[in-house]
Image: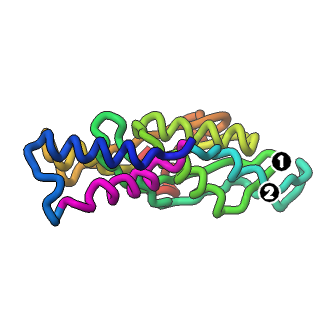
Amino acid sequence: MSIDTARIEAAVLEILAAIGEDPARPGLASTPKRIAQSYGEFFAGLAQDPLDHLAPSADFTADSSEIGELVLLRDIEFRSMCEHHLLPFTGVAHVAYLPKDRIVGLGALPQVVETLAARPQLQERLTEEIADALQTGLDARGVLVVLDATHGCVTARGGRQTRSTTVTLASRGILSEPVERAEIMALIGVPA
């Protein structure tokens, strides 16, 4: 699926007219095109499969000492668009997995986050989708995903809570157990 930039440009022209602006005035003349281009970037994940990023994982024998006990990548910056207001939410993702027979290059983990975030999203669903992708793509013994984000719909409208953040958590396998999760939460720096 590709982004229909012409339709986006037409819609933006209509929005500008609907709020009483002159879409032809110099400051706004290029706005429809700029928004269409930005939406192409914001929603690029709709045309991508996050599991593709995990495909080049490396297989190891079950008794291999190279697998390690835990893989944790903290502070993966992300941005997404809230599907309720089409306003951005930005934050950091912390992802952990317990390898079973496969590991993946560390660069693949932010790619999974970025692909799933580049869709109209809810933070709660995004957290679950990242966990599902890691569990499916790596066949891990356990997965833990924590997202901490600031939402444009909370900071710029309504209650205008400019310093509030939302934290969501999803866990799979062994890391669904509170005792197993607690140590990783401490490593991330989030109270368990």
- Tell me residue 91's x, y (percent): 38, 55
Q: Say whether residue 174 is visible.
A: yes
Q: Which of 24/135 is in front?
A: 24
Residue 107 position within the rendered picture, expressed as x and y whole percent measured from the top left: 64, 63
Q: Amino acid at mark 1?
A: Asp
Color encoding of the figure: rainbow
What's the residue type where badge 2 is placed? Answer: Ile
The circle on residue 101 is 1
Q: Quadrant of the N terminus?
A: top right
Q: Is residue 70 magenta?
A: no
Q: Residue at x 41, y 40 (%)?
A: 123
Segment tinted magenta in the rendering: 28-46
Could you classify mark 1 by the number of other residues whose Cα lies within 10 Å: few (under 14), some (14-19), or many (20 or more)? some
Residue 146 coordinates in the image, percent (x, y): 48, 46
The reply to whether the magenta stretch includes residue 41 is yes
Mark carried by residue 7: none
In three-dimensional space, the C-alpha distance between marks 2 and 1, rounded to whole angstroms, equals 8 Å
Furthest-front residue in view? 24
Instruction: Classify residue 19 as left or right of residue 169.
Output: left
x and y, in percent, of residue 122 in the image: 40, 36
Answer whether residue 190 is visible to the viewer in this image: no
Which residue position holds label 2?
67
User: Is residue 149 placed above or below 142 in the rendered structure?
Assistant: below
Q: Residue at x 50, y 59 (%)?
A: 76
Element type where label 2 sits in the image = loop
